[in-house]
Amino acid sequence: MRPFLIAPSILSADFARLGEDVDAVLNAGADVVHFDVMDNHYVPNLTIGPMVCQALRNYGVTADIDVHLMVKPVDRIIPDFAKAGASIITFHPEASEHIDRTLQLIKESGCKAGLVFNPATPLHYLDHVMDKLDVILLMSVNPGFGGQSFIPSTLDKLRQVRKLIDDSGYDIRLQVDGGVKVDNIAEIAAAGADMFVAGSAIFNTPDYKAVIDEMRAELASIEA
Ligand SMILES: O=C(CO)[C@H](O)[C@H](O)COP(=O)(O)O
C-alpha cells in the first residue's frame, strides 16, 4: 500500500479566513486540501467554485487541491477548475451523461481523475473505466453536509473496492469521506482506504496538529 494521505475537507474551515485556515492545516501536517463543490441541485447545499480555488493558489497554497464535484451537470465546470489550479477532480457517475468522456475531459485538462460513490451508489459504474482512474472515493455519509456520522456499511464496500483495485493492478487511490475521526480511522484503513477526508474532526478542534498527529498514530498501527 502507498503512504496514507490525510485530506482535510475545507467544508468545515473558516470561510471568512480561508487562506489562513488552509495554511494552518497544511502546516499542521495535512497532505492534501479537499475542496467540496456543492451546487444546491445535485446536493442540497451550496458552497464554493473555481474562483475560490484560484484564490487559494493566489494566496500561495502549493499542496494538491482535490476537488470533489457534487454538481450536475459535471462537464462544463471541469476546464474552469483545471485552470484555477485543481490537482485532482472527482465526480459522481450518476451526475454525468457520459462517464468515460468526463474522465477524459479531466485528464486532458491536466488533472488526476476519480469517481465518487454515495453510500447507495452501486459499484458497477467502475466497469470499463478502471484504467482511467487515479482515485475512487467512497462516501461514508450522504453528500451535502459535514458533521454526519460514518455509515458502517462503507467498511464492506471499501473491502470490495480494495480487492477490485488490487486485482486490476492499476495505481488507484482509495479515498473515504464522511464521519472520519481519530477513533475510527484505523478500522477504515484496515478495510482498504489509503486517503482520508476529514472535515469536522479536524477543523472543529483548536489544535489541528494534535488531531492529525493522533490520526497518523492510529494509521501507524495499520502500516506496521
Ligand atoms: O463531502 C462532504 C459532505 O458531502 C464532506 O467532505 C464530508 O462530509 C466531510 O465532513 P466530516 O468529516 O465532517 O464528515
Image (cartoon, grey):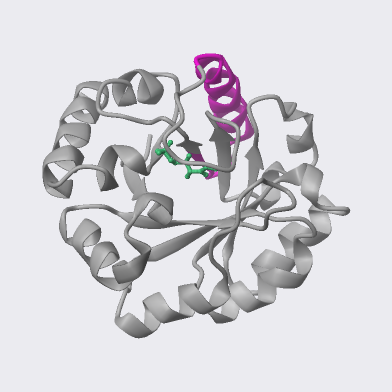
Q: Position of residue 50 (x, y in %)?
A: 56, 74
Q: Left or right of 216: which side holds 152?
A: right
Q: Residue at x 51, y 20 (%)?
A: 151
Q: Left or right of 58: which side holds 145?
A: right
- Whether residue 108 is visible: no
Q: Is 40 placed above or below 111 here?
A: above
Residue 161: say if magenta.
yes
Q: Residue at x 54, y 21 (%)?
A: 154
Q: Residue furthest bottom?
A: 58
Which quarter of the picture shows residue 144? top right
Q: Position of residue 33 (x, y in %)?
A: 38, 58
Q: Left or right of 186: which side holds 42?
A: right
Which quarter of the picture shows residue 112? bottom right
Q: Residue at x 75, y 60 (%)?
A: 74
- Whether residue 116 is visible: yes
The secondary structure that most of the magenta stretch takes on is helix
Q: Position of residue 59 (x, y in %)?
A: 32, 81
Q: Residue at x 59, y 26 (%)?
A: 161
Segment tinted magenta in the rendering? 152-174
Quarter of the picture containing the N terminus is top left
Q: Left or right of 182: which side holds 44?
A: right
Residue 192: say if magenta.
no
Residue nearest the viewer, comparing 195 with 197: 197
Q: Is 77 placed above or below 165 here?
A: below
Q: Position of residue 48 (x, y in %)?
A: 53, 65
Q: Residue furthest right?
A: 97
